[in-house]
Image (tube, grey):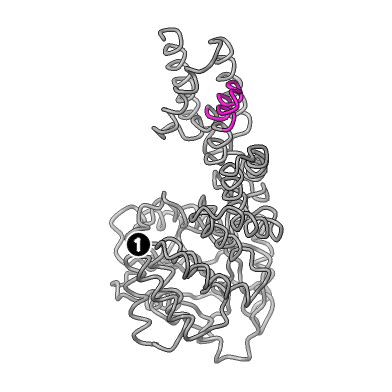
Amino acid sequence: MSDSPTISLCMIAKDEESFIGDCISSVLPIINQVVLVDTGSTDKTIEIAKNLGAEVYYQDWQNDFSVARNVSLQYATSDWILVLDSDEVIYSEDLPEIKRMCSESGVVWELTQRHYTNDVRLSDFMPCSGQFPKLEKSFKGYFESGLVRLFPNWEGLHYRAPIHELVEFCLAERPEFKIKKAKPRIHHYGHTKKDDSKKKKGNLYTSLGQSKTTIQPHDWKNFFELAVEHNNNLRYSESAEAFRKAIELNPTYLSSFVNLGYVYCELGQYDEAAQILESALLLDPRAEEAYCNLGVVYLRQDKLDLAEVNLRKAVTLKPFYVNALYNLSIVFIKKNRLTSGYLCLSKILEFIPEDIRSLRSIASLHLESKNYSQALFYITKAFFISPEDEELRVDLMRTVKMQPKTTDTLFAFQSIKNSLNVNQNAETSSAKLSRQLELEIDNITVFLFNS
């Protein structure tokens, strides 16, 4: 191998014009070759990739992601292969380390994927903390997972499995390679409702997942992955069935129990949910997600004392557990312990200042206490964060009508607008939003003086 190893970026894509330019550009400084295998794009994916120097090859879709992956590997001509999806990027300051990693022999590199999301209910959700300001964008948080994405070329390493395809399956038969965990992260943006193709992908993934369980009916991971896909698509009965099969094949995997408990709760099968979550806690008495889910089960049944006990345990084990804190706030409010509920919501806003659920709940608490100016502050901030939300608009107008002084209301609007302009990230501080805020203030001002 040469003193300065070369790297080929290998990708597969279909209709990824929104992402692919940022993906390729993020690693171009260290890449010697870009290989893109397109499986049927009808948008500008290919044009964008070619403009960035990519070699584009075509492969008919064969209901198997590993087929397309392996075609991309066949065209790689560099010493090392870096695999990225179109909706992923690598931080520019991590590129020198990736280049250095390619100087080691006998190893393959596991990179951590940081999946950005606004769904605080997801397993292992962590609030964004400003570690990567430009990459975190407007996302509330993330969760992480690891997989091999950087490995030497010409060694016969390849992908297997039609869905959730990995080179790890091949590496299990190649003990001469050591898997090492890398410091650089892959920043992934596919876990968002803004991904227009998500529903289509969800149906595709479910179909491929079902095929895997037929081909390998004794592999618990196949049933677990299928259960997750059913759950993501709100098919809770099918999800529960697949989770039960995964547990039957592997009764020691904690996440199967925790997720099945959640699914039972969504189905309204509270006794079954509580039983399976207690089983999870026998496997791991410090499983904070099991405590949270169990707390929600009891909350749904108005067993508030039991809900509080379990949600408190979840927060004790994981102080920044946003979903547990939010559900605990509901318990406290139901028990008329409003100050405790307020403190839980305030804690969430320390982690996620633009969490609309918490802003809205705090506004309601202030209204109940007839603290109208503070209610106006929080509901207006929530509305300016999500001005397309009609329910927030109704809440805002209702709160405005309760204000004793028009001048105080206008002052509050201007203060919140100024605060948002100072604190918002690059995406939400655009000129378009700024104009929208000005328009909303003008509209509400007219409303106040005409009412």
User: Would residue 94 be visible to someone looking at this image?
Assistant: yes
Residue 183 part of the magenta-drawn span: no
Q: Where is residue 367 in the image (x, y as percent from the top left)?
A: 55, 27
**Horizontal side of residue 185 vs 14, given as left or right:** right
For mark 1, what is the residue?
A: 14
Q: In which quarter of the image is the N terminus?
A: bottom right
Vertical side of 445 occupied by 311: above or below: below
Residue 369 part of the magenta-drawn span: yes
Q: Which amino acid does label 1 sit on?
A: Lys
Q: 145 or 399, which lies in front? A: 399
Q: 232 or 316, which lies in front? A: 316
Vertical side of 227 occupied by 217: above or below: below
Neighbor class of circle 1 (other Cα within 10 Å; few <14, some 14-19, many 20+) is some
User: Would residue 186 be visible to someone looking at this image?
Assistant: no
Q: Where is residue 34 in the image (x, y as percent from the top left)?
A: 47, 65
Outermost residue, top side: 449
The quadrant where residue 206 appears: bottom left
Q: Position of residue 36 (x, y in %)?
A: 41, 66
Which residue appears at 59% of the width and 19% of the height? 412
Q: In which quarter of the image is the C terminus?
A: top left
Q: 224 or 56, which lies in front? A: 224
Vertical side of 165 occupied by 440: above or below: above
> Which contiguous range is marked in magenta?
365-379
Q: Position of residue 53 (x, y in %)?
A: 45, 59
How many tags in the picture?
A: 1
Which residue appears at 47% of the width and 17% of the height? 401
Magenta stretch mostly in which secondary structure?
helix
Q: Is mark 1 on a helix, strand or loop?
A: loop
Vertical side of 244 occupied by 174: above or below: below
